[in-house]
Image (cartoon, grey):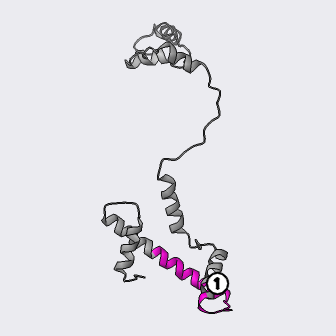
């Protein structure tokens, strides 16, 4: 403090104490003060009937289960089945169907397990391909839903009329 010898550290501290603003504890902002600071509008007045409805708790206060928007679960299932490689047709019902159809051709036919699995694999590949072609037919008709006429058209284009 070469320039001002009368200005000591204690007088400097006293000067700072006088100019310092009082420090207040911070508080949460209420709706009213938030509205004042942001310039928002006051809430609209409600009718007595609406107020009574809000005040009285309904008898069924059970929380409803979460519901996804239409199509969300379908898209999730599509992604899940496109990722997976497992069979989509259950083995036992398919096996019974194969045995029933084979009874019409020849009696007492026996199948190896690998033969049934090969038949099931081929069947699923055929059905998936047919649905893909049917989907293209539906998209061509500016629809997103497959209809029986789309499957019929896909089979006709493939020359599989039966």
Q: Is residue 25 above or below residue 101?
A: above
Name the residue that disc number 1 marks.
99
Q: Residue at x 53, y 13 (%)?
A: 23
Quarter of the figure with residue 158: bottom left
Could you classify mark 1 by the number of other residues whose Cα lies within 10 Å: few (under 14), some (14-19), or many (20 or more)?
Answer: some
Quadrant of image for the C terminus: bottom left
Q: Is the residue 138 above or below the residue 110 in the image?
A: above
Q: Position of residue 115 (x, y in %)?
A: 62, 88
Mark yes or no: residue 150 visible: yes
Q: Kindly report the secondary structure that dominates the magenta region of the rendered protein.
A: helix
Left or right, 20 with reference to 62: left
Residue 140 position within the rendered picture, expressed as x and y whole percent measured from the top left: 31, 66
From the viewer's perspective, is 59 left or right of 135? right
Q: Residue at x 57, y 43 (%)?
A: 66
Query: In the rendering, at what x and y percent does residue 156 appear?
Result: 36, 78
Q: From where the camera sits, is residue 30 visible?
A: no
In which quarter of the view is residue 45 placed? top left
Range covered by the magenta-colored residues: 104-128
Q: Is residue 28 placed above or below 91 in the rendered structure?
A: above
Looking at the picture, tell me which residue is in the foreground, 35 or 18: 35
Q: Position of residue 47 (x, y in %)?
A: 47, 14
Residue at 62% over, 93% down: 106
Nearest to the observer: residue 117 or residue 5:
117
């Amino acid at each position: 403090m070469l320039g001002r010898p009368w200005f000591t550290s204690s007088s400097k501290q006293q000067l700072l104490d006088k100019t310092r603003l009082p420090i207040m504890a911070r508080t949460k902002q209420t709706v009213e003060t938030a509205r004042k600071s942001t310039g928002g509008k006051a809430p609209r007045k409600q009718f007595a009937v609406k107020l009574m409805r809000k005040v009285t708790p309904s008898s069924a206060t059970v929380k409803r289960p979460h519901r996804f928007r239409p199509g969300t679960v379908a898209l999730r299932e599509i992604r899940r089945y496109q990722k997976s490689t497992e069979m989509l047709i259950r083995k036992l019902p398919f096996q019974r169907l194969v045995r029933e159809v084979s009874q019409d051709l020849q009696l007492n036919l026996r199948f190896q397990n690998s033969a049934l699995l090969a038949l099931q694999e081929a069947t699923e590949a055929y059905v998936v391909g047919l649905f893909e072609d049917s989907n293209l037919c539906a998209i061509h008709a500016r629809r997103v839903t497959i209809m029986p006429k789309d499957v019929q058209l896909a089979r006709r284009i493939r020359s599989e009329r039966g």
